[in-house]
Amino acid sequence: MRHQPGHTGFRRVRRAFTLIEIIVVVTIIAVLAAMIAPRLFGRLLWAKKNAAQAEVKAIETAVSLYLNDTGAILSSSFDLDILLVPAEDGGGPQGPYFNKADDLIDPWDNPYFVVVPGEVNYDFDVISMGPDGQEGTEDDIVN
């Protein structure tokens, strides 16, 4: 038998994965993803709730500052958008209390709102409707 260039005897050079190997790898990746995904989504929900709690506190502080600065009396028609208005355009003397309208939107893309008088606090509540977007449910976030 003659030796031909490029041949290494009777050994075959393996150049690709078999279908079985690919299926096994994809299955392992899918199982790992199924185990890890719920934990990641749980952490995401936890992070959004913590962000909403911090934002509710910041809005509560801004409303209190606005009321102290202007001497206004809080009513049920209070609109959080007044916190975005600069002093020269009719906002509070220290305004604007927030720089952009997105500061008044919760992590689930719902607007925060104020309830006067408060259901949890005596004077007012700042509320995020939480993940379900429904007012008055147990996942609402209140100052």
Image: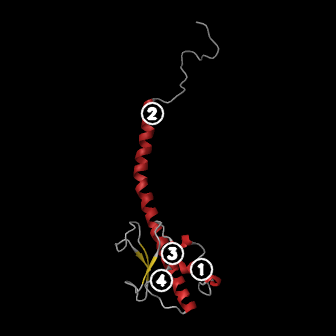
Q: Position of residue 15 (x, y in %)?
A: 55, 26
Distance (Cα) linking label 4 and label 3: 18 Å
Image quarter for residue 30? top left
Residue at position x 60%, y 84% in the image: 90
Q: Which mark is residue 21?
A: 2
Q: Position of residue 138 (x, y in %)?
A: 34, 72
Residue at position x 48%, y 77% in the image: 56
First in sequence, mark 3 or 2: give its number.
2
Give above or below for 107 relative to 37.
below
In the image, what residue type sits under mark 2? Answer: Glu
In the image, what residue type sits under mark 3? Answer: Glu
Residue at position x 58%, y 6% in the image: 1
**In front of the other: label 4 or label 3?**
4
Residue at image mark 4: 78
Residue at image mark 1: 85
Q: Position of residue 36 (x, y in %)?
A: 43, 53
In the image, what residue type sits under mark 1? Answer: Val
Q: Which mark is residue 55?
A: 3
Query: Mark 1: few, some, or many residues within 10 Å (few <14, many ≥20)?
Result: many
In the image, what residue type sits under mark 4? Answer: Phe
First in sequence, mark 4 or 1: give its number.
4
